[in-house]
Image (spheres, rainbow, N blue to C red):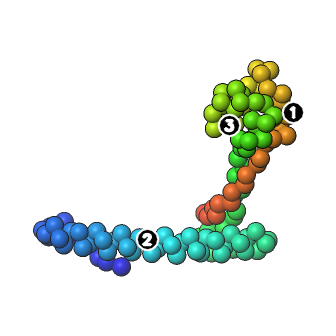
Amino acid sequence: MTAPLDPTVDLTLDELLERYATLRDTLLGLELERDELAARIKAALATGARAETDLYRAELKVSRRVEYPVEPFRDVFGDAAALEVATIDRKKAEALAKAGDLDPERLRGLALVKETQSLVLIPKTR
């Protein structure tokens, strides 16, 4: 790692660029390592393993997002409805169903629930 920049030292533009490039490259390398470690930890946690340090306990946070695939949506509800909700925005589609413009049961049948897992560090309290 590099030492913090001393604000009392005047650096040339080239020296500033060199320092910036070094920091950027260091951060990119650290982010890649962080992502690799997170993937390995998430895989272990998904199998039921537990991980903790003196300060943190690792948990998996699962998020779910409902989406409606465009082609099946269009096949069921038609071109006009597909255009009405544009990218098949979940909130717009559900609003149309609530208003009675779409069949709520058929809409639920089209729903795809996508899950993502995030690694969360829970601070331990002493």
For the residues labelled 3 and 2, the Cα–Cα distance comes to 35 Å
In which quadrant of the rendered view does residue 20 lie?
A: bottom left
Residue 58, position as x, y percentages in the image: 66, 67
Question: Where 75 falls versus 14 (above or below)?
Answer: above
Report the amino acid beneath label 2. Leu
User: Looking at the rendering, in which quadrant would you find the C terminus?
Assistant: bottom right
Q: Which amino acid does label 1 sit on?
A: Glu
Mark 2 Cα-neighbour bin, 10 Å: few <14, some 14–19, many ≥20: few
126 left or right of 25 in image: right
Q: Mark 3 points at which residue?
A: 88
How busy is the neighbourhood of tag 1: few (under 14 within 10 Å), some, or many (20 plus)? few
Q: Is mark 2 on a helix, strand or loop?
A: helix
Residue type indicated by callout 3? Ile
Contact (Cβ within 8 Å) of mark 2 with mark 1:
no
Q: Nearer the viewer, residue 104 or 63?
A: 104
Residue under label 1: 105
The image position of residue 115, as x and y in percent, is 72, 54
Residue lying at 36% horizontally and 79% vertically, measured from the top left: 1
**Nearer the N terminus, badge 2 or badge 1?**
2
Q: Which of 62 and 85 is in front in this view?
A: 85
**SS assignment at label 1:** helix
Using the image, determine if residue 98 lies above or below residue 58. Answer: above
Residue 54 is at least partly visible in this image = no
Give the spatial CA distance, label 2 vs label 1.
Answer: 47 Å
Does the residue at mark 3 contact the one at mark 2 (Cβ under 8 Å)?
no
In front of the other: label 3 or label 2?
3
In primary-sequence order, the first of circles 3 and 2 is 2
Front tag of 2 and 1: 1
N-terminal label among 1 and 3:
3
Name the residue rendered at 63%, 33% in the picture.
86
Image coordinates of residue 96 in percent, x first then y, are 73, 25
Q: What element carries label 3?
A: loop
